[in-house]
Amino acid sequence: MKSPILSIVLLLMSLLLLSSCDNDGDKKGRFLLKGNEKLKENDTKSALEFYTEALKIDPDYKDARYNRGIVYQRLFRLDDAINDYTHIINKSPNDSLTLFQRGLSYLDNGEFYKSLGDAEKLTEEFPLNWQGHFLHGLVLDQFKNHDEALSAFERGLVLEPSNPDLLVNKATILFYAKMYDEATEILEKAETLNPSEANIFNLRSMIAFEKENYQEALDWVEKAIQINPRQAYYYNNRGLYKLYKENLDEGLEDINYSLKQNPKNLFALRNKGIYYVMKSERELALRYLKEVAEKDPEMELVEIYLQKAQAL
């Protein structure tokens, strides 16, 4: 018969063994679940911490690395997001979902040719996946190849006829072509499919602005911000509309907020130049507008306000 002390020692040893088994396998899973819970609560800081703890245990833990990439992407820490997605792709080159997210991150980071590479790989290897055509259309749009972008979105719509993302981006191309009624019709369809898609209301605000309905533009973009308060582009648009409503200080506040989130946004730099024209501050207006004109001379409003700045 074993002594009580020996039995206790053996029990403790078995518990330690069980615990050590748990540390490597289940512990990283618990960190992942905790991270997911924090992400649902919109506590991105804690979510990042839990995903990182999981990756300390297993650097190749795909779910934690992918989810951490999503959080980085949401926080506009795009280099970090790209690094996480690339780590996964190096291990799993044909992971279509990660390729798609990396392509979007490259796009938002201004790395258009790298985004194009991911888009082309997706469309070649997964031709029946709408996401590849969607990403391809987004990149072609950045290259101002609007006709081919429209074709890419339409190829995606053959696969997913009721996809709101594809519909919104098709409407965006029509907006560029100044086909406002056609774009609005598509946006109305998209809204019936997904009334919580903020891009629908942002684009409707842009259409209203082009029609010089500035209060209506403000109303639409406010709805977009209410749905997605993290999108820097919406604040930039709201800032522009406020400038045209002669609410200059609040307009600048929105534009600066947008630039803080994404310093590479040329539209926000343009709008800041417009603000300084409206404030009759010639040197500052010229500084911003000349920078935008050098990088994108065809951008709407740039030439008009550059001339106004020079005339100050």
Image: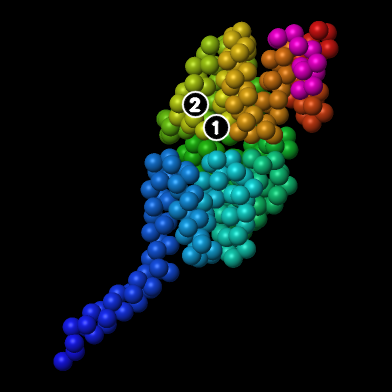
Residue at (80% x, 16% y) in the render: 283
Q: How many marks?
A: 2
Residue at (57% x, 25% y) in the render: 235
Q: Which residue is mark 2?
A: 225
Residue 211 in view here: no
Given residues 18 and 97, the one toward you in this image is 18
Q: Amino acid at mark 1?
A: Gln
Q: Which residue is mark 1?
A: 231
Circle 1/circle 2 CB separation < 8 Å? yes
Label 1, label 2: how far apart the Cα atoms are: 7 Å
Given residues 233 and 193, the one toward you in this image is 233
Locate residue 13, reporting x and y percent.
31, 79
Residue 283 in magenta stretch: yes
Vertical arrangement, residue 124 with respect to residue 155, above or below: below
> Which SS type dominates the magenta stretch?
helix
Give the mark, 1 or 2, whose residue is nearer the N terminus.
2
Vertical arrangement, residue 147 with respect to residue 248, above or below: below
Q: Secondary structure at mark 1?
A: loop
Locate residue 44, reporting x and y percent.
47, 43
Question: Which quarter of the figure has residue 231?
Answer: top right
Q: Amino acid at mark 2?
A: Ile
Q: Residues within 10 Å of mark 2 (few under 14, many from 20)?
A: many
Question: Which quarter of the figure has residue 196?
Answer: top left
Left of 120 or right of it: where is 19?
Answer: left
Residue 227 in view here: yes
Question: Which quarter of the figure has residue 206?
Answer: top right
Q: Secondary structure at mark 2?
A: helix
Residue at (38% x, 48% y) in the render: 37
Residue at (43% x, 41% y) in the render: 43
Given residues 119 and 260, the one toward you in this image is 260
Locate residue 14, reporting x and y percent.
30, 79
Q: Which residues are magenta?
A: 278-288
